[in-house]
Image (cartoon, helix red, strand yellow):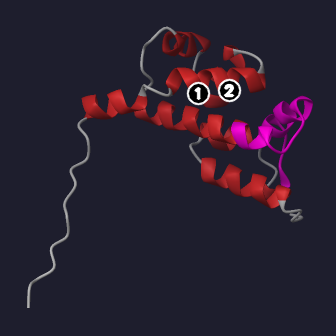
Amino acid sequence: MTPTHAAVVAAPSPSAARVLAGPGARRHLDTCRAAVGSDRAVAEILGVSPSQVSRWRTGQLPDLDNADRLAGLALVVEMLARWLAPEVREGWIHGPNAHLADRSPAYLIRLGRVADVIGALEAEKAGVYA
């Protein structure tokens, strides 16, 4: 009988992980800015300074936590685009949400809790009342 061996995958080094965070950052910024109106609004949702978003736009890579939050916001925005009219999306992101214990999706995205926001979005799409 041959023993089973689990494959060990090393986590990427911080410099390699930083490179992985970068390729989609500009695209995510463009998606988010189109939905919320400005880089300043994106910065507010992510909990960073507007100058930080400006640096990302000009080529500086976001750290991994901010890259994850930015990608999460972009995903939420893309999902909202398939479900809500443009004039309603920003209000959905910033407004209290019963599926999120009356917290705003923007607040939870800032905390890195994108899965909770997606769950709330899916619940609302399905017509589930909170």
Position of 31 relative to 85 (above/below): above
Q: Is residue 92 magenta?
A: yes
User: Is 2 left or right of 13, judged from the image as shown?
Assistant: left
* Label number found at residue 16: none
- Vertical side of 34 occupied by 97: above or below: below
At 89% across and 62% down in the image, what residue appears?
127
- Horizontal arrangement in the rendering, residue 20 relative to residue 123 (left or right): left
Q: What is the x, y in percent for residue 52?
A: 53, 15
Magenta range: 78-98
The residue wearing badge 2 is 32
Mark 1: secondary structure? helix
Q: Are marks 2 and 1 in contact (CB under 8 Å)?
A: yes
| CA gap, disc 2 and disc 1 | 6 Å
- According to the picture, the residue beneath numbered tag 1 turns out to be 28
Name the residue rendered at 62%, 47% in the picture.
114
| Residue at image location 37% in from the left, 32% down from the top | 20
Residue 89 visible to the viewer: yes
Residue 69 on image: x %, y %: 56, 36
What amino acid is at disc 1?
His
The quarter in which the N terminus is drawn is: bottom left
